[in-house]
Image (cartoon, rainbow, N blue to C red):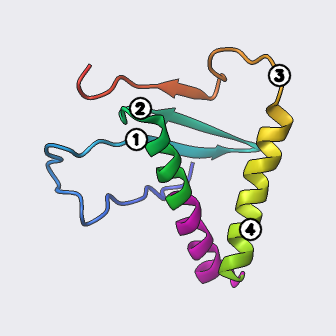
Amino acid sequence: MTDATLPIPDEIPAAGGDGVTELARVWWNGDVPAMIIRPALRDPALMGGVLAELSWNFSRAYAGSHGIDQAQALKEIVQGWQDAHQRAEGLEAPPLMPTVSVSKTAKE
């Protein structure tokens, strides 16, 4: 594993604090993601908004670091999302994939 730990954003107080919760950590493991997630948001629709914002920020990062047009990068991210959901339709999956761990929420 590379020594490329991402820093905590400056907006997040070093001591954490009320209202600050880490939602996920994701690693690329060869050809699949591995992750630990915390379902701390009470409204799953809000998580959808977080994922949309994450996608938009990734598209900007691809534009800045790989020279890809931001709109095209976002289109490809959305297409990848749709393709993955289409492949998963109708599949019976185990409750959690082996590369996913669920952490308790801060209040549990």
CB-based contact (under 8 Å), mark 4 and mark 1: no
- According to the picture, the residue beneath numbered tag 1 turns out to be 23
Which badge, 1 or 3, comes first in the chain's sequence? 1
Is disc 2 surrounded by few (<14), some (14 to 19) or many (20+) residues within 10 Å? some
Is disc 1 surrounded by few (<14), some (14 to 19) or many (20+) residues within 10 Å? some
Instruction: Give the structural element (helix, strand or loop) at label 1.
Output: loop
Instruction: Give the structural element (helix, strand or loop) at label 2.
Output: loop
Instruction: Give the structural element (helix, strand or loop) at label 4.
Output: helix
Which badge, 2 or 3, comes first in the chain's sequence? 2
Which badge, 2 or 4, comes first in the chain's sequence? 2
Q: Quadrant of the C terminus?
A: top left
- According to the picture, the residue beneath numbered tag 2 turns out to be 38
User: What segment carries the magenta color?
Assistant: 54-68
Residue 78 image position (x, y, % from top left): 72, 58
Answer with left or right where residue 11 lies relative to residue 82: left
Which badge, 4 or 3, comes first in the chain's sequence? 4
CB-based contact (under 8 Å), mark 2 and mark 1: yes
The picture quadrant where one finds residue 42 is top left
